[in-house]
Image: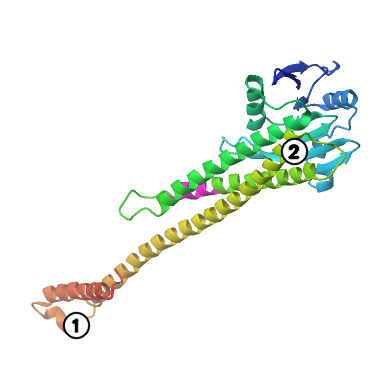
């Protein structure tokens, strides 16, 4: 689906473009969602560009993601998609800036695109050219990444309270805790990857080039660069906290397992002497003087109880229980 956005009273007005139709005059943003090969060929001819294919967008080399051909800037970055689901993913999105017009190619529907398009249709936004639209999109993207990091921070604080809550409270579900830590780590890693790619994109746009940016767009790109740097530091901080929580969780599990093993060990030591005594007097030898003793049975029971109590008191005295 190809949608053209035209400025109208300081807002953006969407116009669907069918394959083969002319791009409306004055279009500042062309958004291609899930384009097929025919759509890419149409955009090549209509815009006089070498539009990247889906395979080109998935290239990892910097020279394939950020480059210039003539007066057109080709920029591909990764975005977090489906972050509100249990399985967020990373998808590439391409921005092509040429002749003060922005072309975006995407094979997913990241939330910032939808939010920015909806906002631009209801409120006045800087949209005199493709550079300003790109700056607005990048601002929406960095806001979304900031929201994701805030969500992760909230999850980290909740997990921390659950791990370090006092003894005697409700039992912890360690499987659930580790799963939540894993989801937080995965989302943080994806956000960090996206921030790195957009940081490179911002540096590529800001470098000296023949493409001149308006003051509004230039200011927006500088603000975006500072925000990306700050969010990158925050993402690194959260990653360290998540690693600490994972280590702490495994430590708590290990401590509880050690306590359980200690209880079994003490129980084994406590019941070993009585078992030994019972084993001795359970032997069926003919010559055992104690068998004919009238008080042999109660004395044996008493010795067995005493031999169990003494190790317990010793462990208690040493603080091992």
Residue that numbered label 1 is attached to = 288
Q: Is residue 130 left or right of residue 183?
A: right
Residue 86 visible in the picture: yes
- The residue carrying pointer 1 sits among few (fewer than 14), some (14 to 19) or many (20 or more) residues within 10 Å by Cα, namely few
Is 225 rendered above or below residue 316?
above
Q: Secondary structure at mark 2?
A: helix
Residue that numbered label 2 is attached to = 218
Q: Secondary structure at mark 1?
A: loop
Q: Residues in magenta?
A: 174-182
Q: Is residue 241 left or right of residue 313?
A: right
Residue 178 sits inside the magenta stretch:
yes
State whether the magenta stretch is mostly helix, strand or loop. helix
Which residue is at 66% across, 20% downward? 121
Between residue 234 and residue 258, name the one nearer to us.
234
Which residue is at 30% across, 73% downward? 269
Which residue is at 75% across, 16% downward? 15
- The residue carrying pointer 2 sits among few (fewer than 14), some (14 to 19) or many (20 or more) residues within 10 Å by Cα, namely some
Q: Quadrant of residue 289?
A: bottom left
> Mark 1 or 2, which is nearer the eye?
2
Tell me which label, 1 or 2, sits earlier in the chain. Answer: 2
Residue 80 sits inside the magenta stretch:
no
Residue reaching furthest front? 215
- Spatial CA distance of label 1 from label 2 is 102 Å
Is 165 rendered above or below residue 213?
below
* Whole-percent x, y for residue 241 in the image: 52, 54
């Amino acid at each position: 689906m190809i949608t053209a956005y035209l400025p109208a009273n300081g807002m953006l007005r969407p116009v669907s473009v069918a394959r083969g139709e002319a791009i409306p005059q004055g279009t500042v943003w062309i958004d291609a969602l899930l384009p097929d090969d025919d759509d890419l060929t149409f955009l090549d001819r209509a815009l006089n560009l070498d539009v990247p294919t889906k395979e080109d967008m998935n290239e990892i080399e910097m020279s394939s993601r950020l480059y210039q051909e003539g007066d057109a800037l080709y920029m591909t970055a990764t975005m977090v998609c489906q972050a509100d689901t249990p399985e967020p993913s990373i998808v590439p999105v391409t921005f092509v800036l040429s002749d003060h017009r922005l072309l975006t190619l995407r094979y997913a529907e990241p939330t910032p695109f939808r939010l920015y398009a909806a906002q631009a249709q209801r409120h006045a936004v800087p949209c005199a050219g493709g550079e300003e639209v790109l700056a607005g999109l990048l601002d929406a993207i960095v806001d979304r990444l900031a929201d994701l990091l805030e969500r992760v921070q909230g999850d980290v604080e909740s997990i921390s309270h659950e791990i370090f809550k006092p003894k005697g409270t409700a039992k912890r579900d360690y499987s659930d805790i580790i799963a939540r830590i894993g989801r937080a780590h995965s989302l943080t890693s994806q956000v960090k990857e996206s921030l790195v790619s957009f940081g490179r994109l911002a540096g590529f746009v800001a470098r000296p080039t023949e493409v001149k940016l308006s003051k509004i767009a230039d200011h927006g790109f500088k603000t975006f660069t500072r925000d990306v740097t700050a969010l990158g530091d925050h993402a690194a901080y959260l990653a360290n906290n998540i690693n600490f929580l994972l280590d702490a969780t495994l430590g708590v599990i290990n401590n509880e397992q050690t306590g359980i093993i200690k209880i079994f060990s003490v129980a084994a030591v406590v019941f070993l002497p009585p078992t030994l005594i019972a084993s001795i007097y359970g032997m069926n030898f003919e010559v055992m003087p104690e068998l004919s003793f009238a008080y042999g049975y109660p004395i044996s029971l008493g010795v067995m109880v005493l031999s169990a109590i003494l190790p317990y008191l010793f462990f208690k005295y040493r603080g091992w229980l």
